[in-house]
Amino acid sequence: MSAPVTTTQPPSPPPPDPHPPRPAALDPTRLRLALRAAPRHPLAVAGLAALFALGVGMLLVLAAGAELATAWQALDEGMFGSPYAIGSSLNSAAVLALIAAGFTVAHRAGLVNVGGEGQLCAGGTAAAAVGLALPAGVPAALGVPLVLVAGFLAGAAWAGIAAWLRVRRGTSEVITTLLLNFIGIGLVSVAVHEEALLRQPVTSSETLPQSAPLPTGAQLPLIGGPESPATAVVPIAVLAVVVTGIVLRHTALGLRLRAVGHSPAASARLGLPVGRLEGGGLAVAGGLAGVAGAALVATAPYVLAEHFSSGYGFAGLVVGLLARGSLTAVAAASLLFGFLTSGGINLQLAAQVPASTVQIVQSVLVLSIAAAMLFTTRRPGSRR
Amino acid sequence: MTAALEVSGLAKSYGGTVALDGVDLVVEAGTVHCVLGENGAGKSTLCHAVAGSLTPDAGTLRLYGQPYAPRRPADALAAGVAMVHQHFSLVSTLTVGENLRLLRLPGLAARIARVRETYGLELEPDAVVGQLPVGVRQRVEIVKALLRDPRLLVLDEPTGVLGPAETDALLETCRRIADAGHAVVLVTHKLGEAVRAGDAATVLRGGRVAGDGTTKDLSARRLVPLMIGRAAGDLDATLAGAVGLEDPEAVGPDAPGPDGLDDPGVLGLDDPAAVGLDDPAVVGPDPVVPGEVVPAAGPVRADDARTPQGAALRLREVTVRRADGAYALEDATLDVAFGEIVGVAGVEGNGQSELTAVLGGSLTPERGRVELDGRELTRALPAARTRAGLGVVPEDRHHEGCVPALSVAENLHLGRLREFRRFGVFLDRAALGRATEAALAEHDVRASGPFAPMASLSGGNQQKVVLARELALDPLKCLVAAQPTRGLDIGAVAAVHARIRAAAGRGAGVLVVSAELDELLTLCDRVVVAYRGRLLGPVDPRAADARERIGALMVGVEGERGAASGVGVGAGA
């Protein structure tokens, strides 16, 4: 990266003096060193990656035959244009933040949870089952916590399968959580197709394969006034991120998780319950994804349906990967992705640019950050 | 005779570490030339230089009189130099025949037939490599090397993974290859093999040639001191000065010997019964019956008569098998009395790592028993061992000893974070820092602060931190220190030794596992020798011939008192 930039330096003028005093900033050696050092800073890396992703996005917009200005306006409108846009962006961001915060917990213990989608499905299914079992007049103070706790427990149990296999059998959690995603997605599908399970009573051939709506007392309350769809999931996610951050940073438990993540062997020697910490970390990751699933079910239209997850599990994984263990970064990346997702929908509606453009930009962003991170951690030219 | 390989002035260093320092070596054609030396003596570096996998800093090589400067392994192969590495390079899911076909050599069948006829090396082409015993896999490797009809064959530690019979077969093969007019360089740290199979030997120590000659002139008795170094006096004096003692020999008698320490109460330890009660995780108090008859399993073992009842650490017939079924530890039996320092010597790979792992709790023995002050800990979790008073300094500092990515404070106190709580939930970093600063001062650790990353410390200071942590156990009944001074400079070595002596002085039993014979001789009251998973000896380090006896046990030249496990090699055969 430094080479092409340094070549743009003006060649030093033919010197009458054999040792012309060169301005310090233009000294090629020093500049090269500065350039080599500058992109190593994580913020600089993220910034460059974002610029690159933005460039790709602009190319895609142009390829779709739209004006850049129109597309930008549509994107902006979809993100911040109305209380509705802001509210739904915040909801998306909250769901992503829950999953990414969980990912970070497991990541501290050295585990990579790629099973957010499956855990989210398990949590959503359990939340729907509990919500539908509640009596119609249940107070929200009771119904909402019950639904969310059901989601947490189901998500934790779903991740617990992978945790158990990992701790007892040494099976890689990357594989197990990934595969459990497909089972979880299938589980939702089965549940909403079978009347014996969660499908709403079939009254005609047009009855959709989805659950009946949750009773009012199980629905997440709106917090942003009548115009905004923002629900209680936003403060819940904020709370989850803050508590997770404090636990990981300021408690003995956080330190133990970190030790296990860095060196299971040394942690075991020092008497830490390595299996319990790893399993617990993964279970919490699943639990938070489960809460995210419960929140999706308990948000309008208040039903469990196929594809209710909308790929949030995978998007949350991406946010978690991007945040690289920092909960501040989890919050920031969740907001970015949440708003971009909402904006992307409007991009398609208003500017006829496919919404998947935003997904491509997000993916490019992740890829370029991941690639650039190697740059920060590894010196070029070093062999190992 | 023509010189097959002439090495002169070969030097190579990695960063500040000198691996080879002006090595000269002549290998005659038609001979088996042994390169001997302890771990880290530079044997492997020499091999890699000859086989073209590294470029030396200085020095020249000549192959059959021609200048030879391989820059990559392919150059070496083209010049007729083949190397069999310590670790096999076979695809274990393929058959033997498929593995050989991977070489893409023309006329493969004819070559295989020729190797079979010339050297008597039979192969089963349809056998899957992964299902073959290691000896056969190695034979495949050797055949692979011979298929190219090399003029010089280099074998790097070929016998490390082999049993006695397989070793004999290999040495026989080496002999045949030499008889066919080629030259064989056999790198080993086992003297018995060198004496048996070699025509000539070169002993490396610390990257230099410590001695060479034909094996007729070099008997095992002469090779041992060359290999392990005779200059013990110099090192001892340095250490003694650094520790503040005039005469290292005075340390042994001054330290509390095993004899006067029958009563643990003298040592200010807690009542063992009380300790047993507050720890439900440990399997019962299970007191040792005094005078319990220990079934004789090994032909040679630690001398029970010398150790008093209620040993700090007691191992009985601890047996561990590796994944391939070979014994890593076989009926290892040992007692460490309170206040006694017992050393475990031995060439690496003779069960020392497994012994430490069994004591640290990361490996469960197949059978046998581990007791700490009369309490069984064979299957106890590491935390229970720590609570019971067993401190362990693992052999690999970076893998098990500490977490390099965490800070010094966190490493010191990771096992006892409960003592550093604020408001019941939060970690009290200030208190953690204060406790760490005190420990750093007490143990003279140089760190930029209590929250400096462990990885930023020098090896010596890291080891001091690990040792400080294990010595802080209350009560400390026994300390197990594996390779406690590996990679440390002389000052740090002295500090670590002083700490270990002080621990024994306060009444803890100490078990030191080390590849450094000098270290064991200066530090220990008794030395046992790990050889093929058994603990042989003990040898009294104060005896005049202690070094020779330990050296002999280490390399299997002779088994003391007719050990059946020692290979029956006639010295100077």
Image: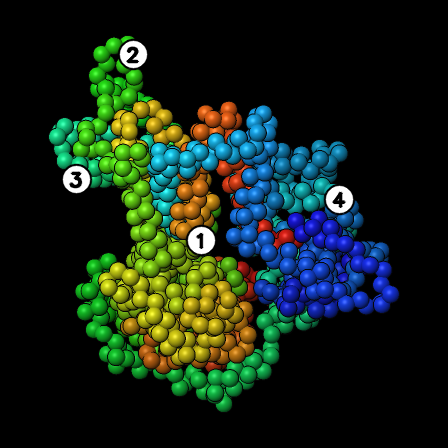
| Residue receiving disc 1 | B327
What is the chain identity of the residue bearing mark 4?
B
Q: CA distance from mark 4 to mark 2?
A: 80 Å
Mark 3 element type: helix
| Residue receiving disc 4 | B149
Residue type at numbered disc 1: Tyr
Residue type at numbered disc 3: Ala
On the question of residue B150 being in view, the answer is: no
Residue type at numbered disc 2: Glu
Mark 1 element type: strand
Which dot, 4 or 2, sits closer to the camera?
2
Could you classify mark 4 by the number of other residues whose Cα lies within 10 Å: few (under 14), some (14-19), or many (20 or more)? some
Q: CA distance from mark 3 to mark 1?
A: 64 Å
Mark 2 element type: loop
Residue at the spot x=26%, y=65% of the render? B422
| Residue receiving disc 2 | A206
Expressed as whole percent of the image width and height from the top left, the position of residue B30 reads: 76, 55
Expressed as whole percent of the image width and height from the top left, the position of residue A184 reads: 34, 30
Do the residues bearing badges 4 and 1 touch, measured as CB atoms within 8 Å?
no
